[in-house]
Image: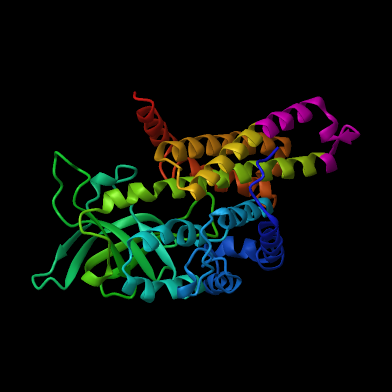
């Protein structure tokens, strides 16, 4: 059961992505996980395929596509193969809306061609050591120079996906003192060149999952950022972040639905091949019932994710409905993947099996992009509570 949202062009793109993953990702993914990041030229390969610049306007070297459905297909096919694309999703699915909505014509000319080819990789830095979901509490500070030509940036960020390999980092910082009556005011987005003096990548943070994606600490010590590298208006950062959160949360919801489906496929294949007491594990009633329960939940998640995807393309996906999709799809993925791992027995705990990687990789989806608890708060507020 699935909403009919894809056409023949999407199917052709899916076949291309599936073939690319089988030939150029799966054989190397274990090595990428061991080294803690994908090779830098992997992003250039995605650029050659048109994956990075699918939604970049044609005048800047992109595909000019307005629909998010091609991005969704990449998410689905990567999940089906049990692999990840490093910082691809942050670069393509999170950063691009900021550049398209906020960048000046000059900034677009400067950044978007490299964005599409993978020559200029982007990351976004919001989280700080003492600030998680409470973005209004950001302490990283930027002071405008006396002559008004640049900002001087000081502070630190943590849990930054793709931060170690990025060429430009969108840094959310405070450009005016916090106002107790409006804690959200005074935040600004600066685009920081990672080659700038005073910028440093700290420790690459070891994680229980998503190991092919680098996650790092970033430090800023009197980094000079030209005023021309400010994104949008000064002091409007919090508003910009809120405006782009629905797409970020939809991306995570789509991943939740896709990984739940992948887990069911992995468990079905394993239980059909594995024998216990002279018969396949799949032949036992418990196995059938568990997979049936998982299928029902995964189908519900898929329908919700597809509906949210359609709403995004129509421009009608609200903050609250994106929160509903993220909450439901990631919680479903957690339950389904856990049950499917159980059906693998001891082998489900061995990272050689894709179900083990799914288990570790998916756990963070209930944390990043806003925790499940934050999603519940947003939904409750939408209910008038």
| Residue 256 versus residue 142 in the image, above or below | above
Q: Furthest residue to the left? A: 146
Q: Quadrant of residue 32?
A: bottom right
The image position of residue 39, as x and y in percent, is 55, 71
Residue at the outermost right position: 278
User: Quadrant of the image for the N terminus?
Assistant: top right
From the top left corner, tell me how far across and down residue 226 is, in percent.
23, 72
280 in the magenta segment: yes
Side (left or right) of 17 relative to 127: right
User: Looking at the image, which residue sits at the far front?
Assistant: 314
Image color mode:
rainbow
The answer to whether 28 is drawn above or below residue 367 in the figure is below
For this rendering, which residue is in front, 3 or 239? 3
Residue at 22% across / 45% down in the picture?
A: 184
Q: Main secondary structure of the magenta part?
A: helix
Task: Tell me if residue 226 can be seen.
Answer: no
Q: Position of residue 170 (x, y in %)?
A: 34, 62
Relative depth, front residue between 163 and 71: 71
Quadrant in the picture for the C terminus: top left
Mark yes or no: residue 279 visible.
yes
Q: Closer to the camera, 309 or 52? A: 309
Q: Which residues are magenta?
A: 272-296
Residue ID at (84%, 43%): 273
Expressed as whole percent of the image width and height from the top left, the position of residue 38 reads 55, 66
- Total numbered labels placed on residues in the image: 0
Within the magenta stretch, is there residue 270?
A: no
Above or below residue 2? Residue 222 is below
| Res. 188 image quadrant | bottom left
């Amino acid at each position: 059961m699935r909403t009919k949202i894809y056409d023949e062009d999407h199917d052709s793109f899916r076949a291309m992505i599936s073939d690319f993953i089988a030939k150029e990702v799966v054989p190397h993914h274990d090595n990428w996980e061991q080294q803690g990041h994908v090779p830098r030229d992997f992003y250039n390969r995605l650029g050659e395929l048109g994956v990075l610049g699918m939604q970049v306007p044609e005048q800047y070297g992109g595909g000019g596509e307005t629909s998010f459905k091609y991005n969704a297909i990449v998410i689905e096919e990567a999940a089906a193969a049990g692999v990840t694309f490093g910082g691809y999703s942050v670069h393509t699915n999170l950063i691009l809306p900021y550049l398209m909505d906020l960048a000046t014509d000059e900034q677009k000319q400067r950044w978007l061609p490299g964005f599409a080819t993978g020559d200029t990789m982007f990351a976004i830095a919001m989280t700080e050591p003492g600030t998680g979901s409470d973005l209004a509490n950001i302490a990283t500070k930027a002071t405008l120079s006396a002559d008004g030509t640049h900002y001087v940036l000081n502070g630190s960020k943590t849990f930054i996906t793709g931060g170690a390999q990025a060429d430009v980092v969108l840094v959310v910082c405070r450009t005016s003192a916090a106002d107790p009556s409006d804690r959200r005011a005074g935040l600004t987005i600066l685009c920081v060149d990672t080659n700038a003096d005073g910028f440093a990548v700290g420790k690459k943070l070891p994680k229980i999952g998503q190991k092919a994606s680098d996650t790092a600490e970033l430090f800023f010590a009197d980094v000079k950022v030209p005023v021309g590298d400010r994104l949008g208006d000064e002091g409007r950062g919090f508003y910009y972040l809120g405006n782009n959160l629905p797409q970020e949360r939809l991306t995570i919801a789509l991943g939740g639905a896709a990984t739940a489906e992948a887990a069911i496929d992995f468990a079905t294949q394993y239980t059909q091949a594995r024998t216990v007491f002279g018969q396949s594990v799949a032949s036992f009633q418990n196995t059938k019932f568990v997979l049936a329960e998982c299928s029902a939940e995964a189908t519900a998640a898929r329908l919700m994710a597809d509906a949210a995807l359609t709403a995004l393309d129509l421009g009608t996906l609200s903050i609250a409905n994106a929160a509903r999709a993220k909450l439901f799809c990631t919680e479903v993925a957690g339950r389904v993947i856990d049950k499917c791992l159980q059906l693998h027995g001891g082998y489900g705990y061995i990272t050689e099996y894709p179900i083990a990687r799914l288990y570790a990789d998916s756990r963070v989806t209930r944390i990043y992009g806003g925790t499940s608890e934050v999603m519940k708060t947003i939904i409750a507020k939408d209910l008038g509570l």
